Image (cartoon, coloured by chain):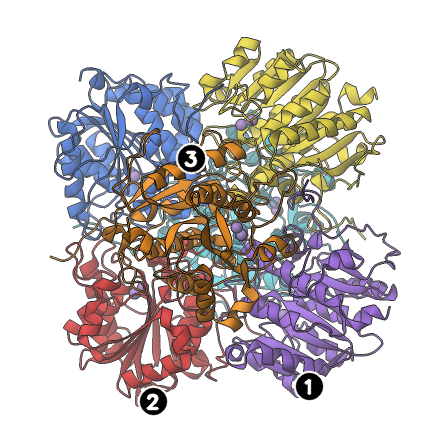
Chain colours: A red, B cyan, C blue, D yellow, E purple, F orange
Amino acid sequence: EGGRRAAPYSGIPTLLDAPHRSIGNEQLDINDLDVALFGVPMDLGVTNRNGARFGPRALRSIERVGPYNDALECAPIHEMAVADIGDVPLLSRFDLAQSHADIEAFVAKIIAEGVIPLAVGGDHSISHPILKAVGAKAPVGMIHIDAHCDTGGSYEGEKFHHGGPFRNAVLDGVLDPERTIQIGIRGGAKYIWEFSEMSGMTVIEAADISNIGIDEVIKRARDVIGDGPTYLSFDIDSLDPSFAPGTGTPEVGGLTTREAMALIRGMKGANLVGGDVVEVAPAYDPTTNTAQNGAQMLFEILSLIQFTPFRNSK
Amino acid sequence: EGGRRAAPYSGIPTLLDAPHRSIGNEQLDINDLDVALFGVPMDLGVTNRNGARFGPRALRSIERVGPYNDALECAPIHEMAVADIGDVPLLSRFDLAQSHADIEAFVAKIIAEGVIPLAVGGDHSISHPILKAVGAKAPVGMIHIDAHCDTGGSYEGEKFHHGGPFRNAVLDGVLDPERTIQIGIRGGAKYIWEFSEMSGMTVIEAADISNIGIDEVIKRARDVIGDGPTYLSFDIDSLDPSFAPGTGTPEVGGLTTREAMALIRGMKGANLVGGDVVEVAPAYDPTTNTAQNGAQMLFEILSLIQFTPFRNSK
Amino acid sequence: EGGRRAAPYSGIPTLLDAPHRSIGNEQLDINDLDVALFGVPMDLGVTNRNGARFGPRALRSIERVGPYNDALECAPIHEMAVADIGDVPLLSRFDLAQSHADIEAFVAKIIAEGVIPLAVGGDHSISHPILKAVGAKAPVGMIHIDAHCDTGGSYEGEKFHHGGPFRNAVLDGVLDPERTIQIGIRGGAKYIWEFSEMSGMTVIEAADISNIGIDEVIKRARDVIGDGPTYLSFDIDSLDPSFAPGTGTPEVGGLTTREAMALIRGMKGANLVGGDVVEVAPAYDPTTNTAQNGAQMLFEILSLIQFTPFRNSK
Amino acid sequence: EGGRRAAPYSGIPTLLDAPHRSIGNEQLDINDLDVALFGVPMDLGVTNRNGARFGPRALRSIERVGPYNDALECAPIHEMAVADIGDVPLLSRFDLAQSHADIEAFVAKIIAEGVIPLAVGGDHSISHPILKAVGAKAPVGMIHIDAHCDTGGSYEGEKFHHGGPFRNAVLDGVLDPERTIQIGIRGGAKYIWEFSEMSGMTVIEAADISNIGIDEVIKRARDVIGDGPTYLSFDIDSLDPSFAPGTGTPEVGGLTTREAMALIRGMKGANLVGGDVVEVAPAYDPTTNTAQNGAQMLFEILSLIQFTPFRNSK
Amino acid sequence: EGGRRAAPYSGIPTLLDAPHRSIGNEQLDINDLDVALFGVPMDLGVTNRNGARFGPRALRSIERVGPYNDALECAPIHEMAVADIGDVPLLSRFDLAQSHADIEAFVAKIIAEGVIPLAVGGDHSISHPILKAVGAKAPVGMIHIDAHCDTGGSYEGEKFHHGGPFRNAVLDGVLDPERTIQIGIRGGAKYIWEFSEMSGMTVIEAADISNIGIDEVIKRARDVIGDGPTYLSFDIDSLDPSFAPGTGTPEVGGLTTREAMALIRGMKGANLVGGDVVEVAPAYDPTTNTAQNGAQMLFEILSLIQFTPFRNSK
Amino acid sequence: EGGRRAAPYSGIPTLLDAPHRSIGNEQLDINDLDVALFGVPMDLGVTNRNGARFGPRALRSIERVGPYNDALECAPIHEMAVADIGDVPLLSRFDLAQSHADIEAFVAKIIAEGVIPLAVGGDHSISHPILKAVGAKAPVGMIHIDAHCDTGGSYEGEKFHHGGPFRNAVLDGVLDPERTIQIGIRGGAKYIWEFSEMSGMTVIEAADISNIGIDEVIKRARDVIGDGPTYLSFDIDSLDPSFAPGTGTPEVGGLTTREAMALIRGMKGANLVGGDVVEVAPAYDPTTNTAQNGAQMLFEILSLIQFTPFRNSK
Ligand SMILES: [Mn+2]
Ligand SMILES: [Mn+2]
Ligand SMILES: [Mn+2]
Ligand SMILES: [Mn+2]
Ligand SMILES: [Mn+2]
Ligand SMILES: [Mn+2]
Ligand SMILES: [Mn+2]
Ligand SMILES: [Mn+2]
Ligand SMILES: [Mn+2]
Ligand SMILES: [Mn+2]
Ligand SMILES: [Mn+2]
Ligand SMILES: [Mn+2]
């Protein structure tokens, strides 16, 4: 009679085909979950091509990522309690500051339930309010995979754009720069990221990865984050545009997906307390490759969470 | 201080942004509904370009169709009980006959609950099993908008392909050809549809619509269907390929969307007992126009149902 | 030896291939011009798909619109003094209110030089600050071609989004609703535009145009605007998505380009004091048709200006 | 057991799925044919976007045009002897004049065999050498459907570009301007086509077709061409870009396919001695609609030939 | 006077620009050939995105692959007798089992003529009937380059889908698992391929290739296949989606084309008795890169055949 | 208050956002410049897919390449005097020889002003006239990055096509083959490039680069060019089609962008006297990746010029 599961293109689309959990506006009612997947359809913080507000929709539409992770040997949707709880309810499509407040409040509720938040952006500015919730009690470390350091200062009068979330997080005391590593950095804006090195972050440039080797990059990353609680933020523009054209500030010369997957998988056992995949802009993604790569990286991060000490201590 | 509803690109995508109703495998538990929207992601009956199995996903992803119908003056999602109940559970991705059986069984359950079924294909072969359920007690009339009559016979040994559902439905006694009108017909396959005229269907060719005028077409359609129970089947290839490139058997010289909407709206008050929108194949739809037009026509049909005597007699 | 002009794909791209006029930040130095073409790359006011910030770039890249207008019998770039003066210098990519202030100030300078402003958006919210400059001395009338009335109120706490510029303009006393006609209206948001009719605007719906006929629409428009100073605002989503997929809030059932061009050309001799073409979002425009239609409409409006009494009185 | 023909997507692609006739370099060996379909993959005469050299490939790849013409009631591939004889062997990819010589020589051989030539371009400059062969004995009349008159003079030192074939043909005495009608004309280059009217051609502009009506256009065309030998040249840019984006010099405001098909079909019985479909540039045709419309028009012209007195007198 | 060959975009498109050999339905009449290239436009066995039925057309449309193979130093189309013999005549577009029977019968005829079959799919299920013909006398070994092992069992009641051809081939005794190597494996379905290892196949995962190195992979492959008759099956989804988006079940993290070409070329001298390139679905291939890579791999396999002992013993 | 520069998508598009310098027809008036960026919108020399005439427009439209080069540690637009001086004025769109003459004359004027020319094609045939100007006094060496050697002879009667510029340059005595290295070579045309090795050029094939390593390639390149004046010609088809689909003669198995950038950057300090980036054909570039990669390589070459002894001796 053989196997059977629903066709990958059937049904209501959810992140990683996780079950949908409809949540109320006031209370989340999710304390049975290990991980909450959710979208943040907001891109008011972008500096160039916009459209990452459609990122959550794009990742939900991808078929066939998972359920089994052959490298990490787990099936996270089946072996943990995971749900797609929909999108952050944002009070305004026009107000960046309000959106950030909405995001922080929403993630704080997730954390209050003892659930690990795993977000899909939206632009990278969302990581700041998420970190404010995740690092509220104590600053966290971070694996940050990106073409950009995103530690820039105020720009055109706006401090909370997508080029600065991690400076803001450090200044707010929710991110520990000494326990932060930034991987894949490149491009013409490097001179505005002096905060990264000044604050003590470790920066690995894309151009050096071929020579360093991914195994050594993994080793450095684990050294930086140690055993403490750690956030993993994956900006899809860390990948080369040949893999991820669908993003707002593409930078030539990026990571391959084999490198990126090896890197994330190399974090097995790290103490992850949250994560995100950001900056997928499907209007620039005619093949859907960008969204598929985003969903794959989301799946890899979710898989890591199965092995995190944090979860097991719940 | 001003209005507010969720951003059209946020949340879990559903057909026409209707609420999602998760249903069990055995019982549908939908008898509070007026109309059940559902997908039929099956395209084993196509004869050329395939991909209509992704039609339901494509229509769910469209933003901003409805909620208000300014021509028909109604807001059907709000004024009726409507839900997206997901997709027909199909036992096999490889078996056309089994799929048709699954569809018929599923629609029969919907009807048993006193709910009007409104399907999104998938290829047009699905209309046959739907009609077998809808017309089980007595044959129904039909408004059929399509480039093709779909009354062809067996082809390459297969009787139940997407070019023959309405011959099959007539032969099964579930469709009344005298109460059937086919609108938008054109193209090089006309010679295989002699069944349409032989059985008594009314056929209006696309090339004649400019001269006849939509108002007259509406009048003929209402004459044909009368007051009896009527099904409305909308094949997206009825539209010209400039409006609907994303379909498997496009035919040059089709309807405009203004004509198609006027036509459907002209059916206000008809006794609709079910309907479908079929043949949207998003892989051929780089602008998403085809899916948007499909969603719009679905919305128009749903709006009609608000005025159907059938519903009000429930 | 034959004719010769530069190949249409050569050189620095400008709007309608008009000469580029580089302007300083403080003074515009354009008082020799009849018409100033300029871009407004700002889309913080959109409610759905964004990307209209790339509209000016998209229109500049189009080849071969003009130089001769065979219907209006003029060659406006050659017969008037016209330049592309670049884009409004916007102080912030993140601040809608600031952007509107920047736009108003910039257009006020153009008008102070006695030059007619002709803008390329950007989202439709830009028409409000433009009208504040254009109608500063006395309210103007308006030909408004759009799928949407854009007379909605505050939304999610924001009053100055792209769905409300003309309510705002009326309330600010710069737009005369009695001398305003809105053409091409359709779609599910109609119920939020009651301000249009309450304030005395004339509204012509897309669905009625086939029956009314373009000649009659022109007549009504001329009756509404009379001889007074008049603005012409062209939202590209007035066109059907088959013509203009590249826009943020497409609506099925729109105008054809033949209708739109006939309509604009029918305004020959009207007293135009400014205009705009808005809402071209090239990320959704794989064929470049939307941008080409936008450039064509810009050219038609520019051609009208050659016949405006306002210009001749300069 | 039902019908059967090869799947439309199977086998070696040919024009209109006609049988392929492989021909030698010296002798064509086609005198059993009624009509020879062939490609002319040459676009050195274009003035803007190029790529029409891929036009023949694009039309060959289209599925499902024909075999039956329901309006003209014929099945031309089956009822005449028709073959796709491949492409004109062009001696150089770089030499426009040589290409034109190659084309003329090739078509002369077809005509010497008593076969009607039906060409697929390539750019419109190919019509000049074709007409030199077709009209070698006596000038022919012409139905010319195009956005452009293509009666321009020398340009940048080149007389034989795609904007001038019909001036050249008249000056060479192979085209009778009094028996020539040009339909669909529009756009900013009109002032360079004064030759059309000076030489006695009839010109019908696109903007006037809605008012004139297609039936009247047909009548005028038949009056112009009379009973004499007539060529039909279809430039795909006659269609509006919403139907035919894949072309090098698109012009807003063109014909619909329903108008174009009605127009061609209205020529039933005309004395056709050859024809062409030109200017399909598939690199700009993401939906394949342009190629499909090209193939459809080719099919309509081929269908006309079944009724031409010329053929029957063979 | 310089070189000359037909422009790559001219003429009737064939696989690798090989001569077209038209074959009858009953007898193939090809015994003068060394290699028969043919298409199998069938995709009823796919489990997700369909459209590989257009794979043969897509590969035929590619220009400029070959004629010279600089790595293998041969010009296979010129130095062997090779033809494109068209597509397998399939009796039904709707019947997977019938299609498989048709394929097996067709390939058996090719082999009976002493010709090496080289197929272009279609989905991967076609390799099973091909192997039934190729391995009819004795089981063959196989180089299998794919993201998936394709040794799954019955699925939704269907045993002969594209995820199981090689299990079926082993069970039918036509494929020797001990002489089979599978290269490029990855993704979430690995747990359903236990048959590969249980039956004795060698499996090399994509994630390990960077570390192992292509030279070592080649060595292992040659060890596995030895000197016996060997089939080479290339699933285009073995390549990373950045190279091959146009396929139905893309998997992140695949081979580069430099790796894949090196791998195939490393098989020079192996005893190849047949091969295929499968799973190209052009509707998902907006750049044509997938089809070009498919054609290139087809060319590499064809080049190998020039050095196979099998051919030389003919 | 934070930083501020104009939004990357605003204003008149220029190459690398360099200032636009409008130049007269007779005199260039650029002797204050260090480097002149300019376009050459000409593609009459291509042998397959055309459209590189739109290459300059495509590169101008790219946002956000530069201003800082973090690897070479310079900001060339700010630290040198650089301008986009528009496109070479070409007398004819139809005449390859005339175009080459126009290019040579234009570049000669640039050089006469003591300015380094940096061109954007256009097809690769333009490098021949550029080199005639650059090497007029003495032959130069060359770094040539390309899939093709472009040292072929006359083809179809044309000597000056895009497959032969460097043979022509050597024969004209403007290029020193002993000081020329060609990197990235591959594909089926290799046998027509025997001139490369016969004349003494160094050729490095793409397939060998993984084994040789980029560092060694750089070393060989520097050995070949030495300290003499050197030209750098970058054909975008040197990159693999996954990075650069938008080109006319794509070849599978090319360079990655990380390799290409490392290679160019490795030339720091070389005595560059000119350069070009050619063969970007945007009609085949749906993601704009090809244009972005072209702009990036242009930026890398421009950065190199900041360190060239030639410039400093000015
Ligand atoms: Mn970032
Ligand atoms: Mn980034
Ligand atoms: Mn149908
Ligand atoms: Mn149909
Ligand atoms: Mn608007
Ligand atoms: Mn609008
Ligand atoms: Mn023409
Ligand atoms: Mn034309
Ligand atoms: Mn496979
Ligand atoms: Mn596979
Ligand atoms: Mn080259
Ligand atoms: Mn090249």
Which mark is drawn over residue C258? none
Relative to F57, does residue E110 appear above or below in the rendering?
below
Find residue D192 and report its horizontal and vertical position in percent.
47, 18
In the image, what residue type sits under mark 3?
Ala
Chain letter of disc 1 in the image: E
The image's mark for residue E199 is 1
Q: Amino acid at mark 2?
A: Asn
Q: Secondary structure at mark 2?
A: helix
Q: D178 or E308: nearer the eye?
A: E308
Q: Is residue A7 visible?
A: no
Above or below, comparing residue F117 to residue E242 in the picture: above
Hey, which quadrant is residue D217 in on the image? top right
For disc 1, the neighbor class at 10 Å (few under 14, some 14 to 19, many from 20) is: some
Nearer the observer: mark 2 or 1; the answer is: 1
Q: Where does label 2 land, which residue?
A: A312
Q: Is mark 3 within 8 Å of ligand 11?
A: no
Residue pushed farthest bottom?
A313
Disc 3 marks which residue? F105
Instruction: Give the distance between the C-alpha atoms of the residues marked 1 and 3, in whole angstroms.
Output: 71 Å
Subunit under mark 2? A
